[in-house]
Amino acid sequence: MSRRLPIYFLIDISESMVGEPIQQVEEGLSTIIQALKTDPIAMETVYVSIIVFAGEAKTLIPLQEIINFYPPKFPIGSGTSLSKGLGHLMFELRRNIIKTTPEQKGDWKPIVFLFTDGVPTDETHNAINEWKQNWQRSSNMVAVSFGDETDSKLLGELTENVLLFKNTNASSYKEFFKWVTASIKTHSTRIADAEISDGGINLGKLNNTIIEKIDLSKEQPKQWVDNNFVVLSAKCQNTKRPYLMKYKKNLRTEDFGGLPLDTMHYRLVGAYQIDNSYFELSDQNAISQKINTEELRGAPTCPCCGNQFAFAVCSCGNLHCIGDEEISTCPWCNTTAKYGFGGDGGFDVNRTQG
């Protein structure tokens, strides 16, 4: 058997990835695999695995030859536990990587592509230290920030290859995943041709309008909730299925008595039906966070049944949809109640970690 080049994709599937970002990642990984299957060198050397993390982490696709690889449907979870993602990655590396011995040559240095769009919602110190001590030199990591408000300083502790993907539209995603494919092909070709030692990764040429290296000198405060987005979890009253309502931070300057003041609110991106794997991949011990409804702009219909109002609050504190029925039943706690509308001012609701 020829020496393997293990490729691990460690992917953030927190609530802020719901909607277009996670759909584009699914499609992008599919195009990567399709392209690699047409490359004879990659077919012979490249093995691929997908690990996902939110509040918990799991192996979605175990390490396997690309000929047998079929891109999966990605779940969504609550939180961004980078420590659990790294811990699960290191567990898989220990279990799967073949080491060089006097009798045989082991795998080439594994390549890890870490994709994340927010800040960790947990303490990462121990996991990062373990990575530095045991895997930083024996693997090649490329950390990619999906958006410009990721904790890039923290990513810089994991690897010197910290990049910003400017995910502005669908064509940007296509170009980004072409770059990932080119990087894998280039690296596999050069190690096969013995042009390089088993050292650093050979990345494809960067298009700076789409992806660029991040300035790691900027100081960033630590936070435990991703404030780039507000995501609310709810259940459909009719189908009992969970769904997420996603709001994106919006900053603007307004005139108050001749003084320009910056104001912030969160504008609705959309509502998305998810499945019950969301709860499996969520940190059940996470501290509950609140958001006042006056900070939110827009209210969606239910993405599961089409009820006009997806944003009703039960006395148990959870959200669900309501329609024309006189009496509604909470799908979380089965409490029945009659809902009214109106009232002055906002109220606090539970938000996810994002």
Image (cartoon, rainbow, N blue to C red):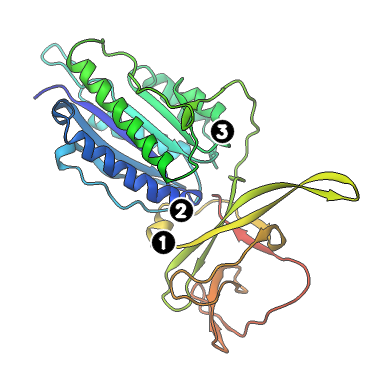
- Give the residue at mark 3: 151
Crowd around label 1: few <14 · some 14–19 · many ≥20 (10 Å): some
Tell me which numbered mark, 2 or 3, is placed earlier along the sequence.
2
Q: Quadrant of the N terminus?
A: top left
- CB under 8 Å between callouts 2 and 1? yes
**Mark 3 neighbour class, 10 Å CA radius: few under 14, some 14 to 19, many 20 or more:** many
Identify the residue position indicated by label 1 in the image.
274
Q: Give the label on residue 18, or none.
A: 2
Residue 119: x, y in percent? 55, 39
Mark 2 and 3 residues: CB-CB less than 8 Å, in contact?
Answer: no
Q: Is residue 206 left or right of residue 46?
A: right
Name the image quarter holding residue 326: bottom right
Q: Amino acid at mark 3?
A: Asp
Q: Position of residue 76 (x, y in %)?
A: 42, 53
Measure how far apart labels 2 and 3 are at the Cα level.
19 Å
* For discs 2 and 1, the disc positioned in front in the rendered view: 2
* Dot label at residue 312: none
Q: Residue at x 43, y 27 (%)?
A: 207
Give the image location of residue 279, x and y in percent: 43, 58
Lower sequence index among marks 3 and 1: 3
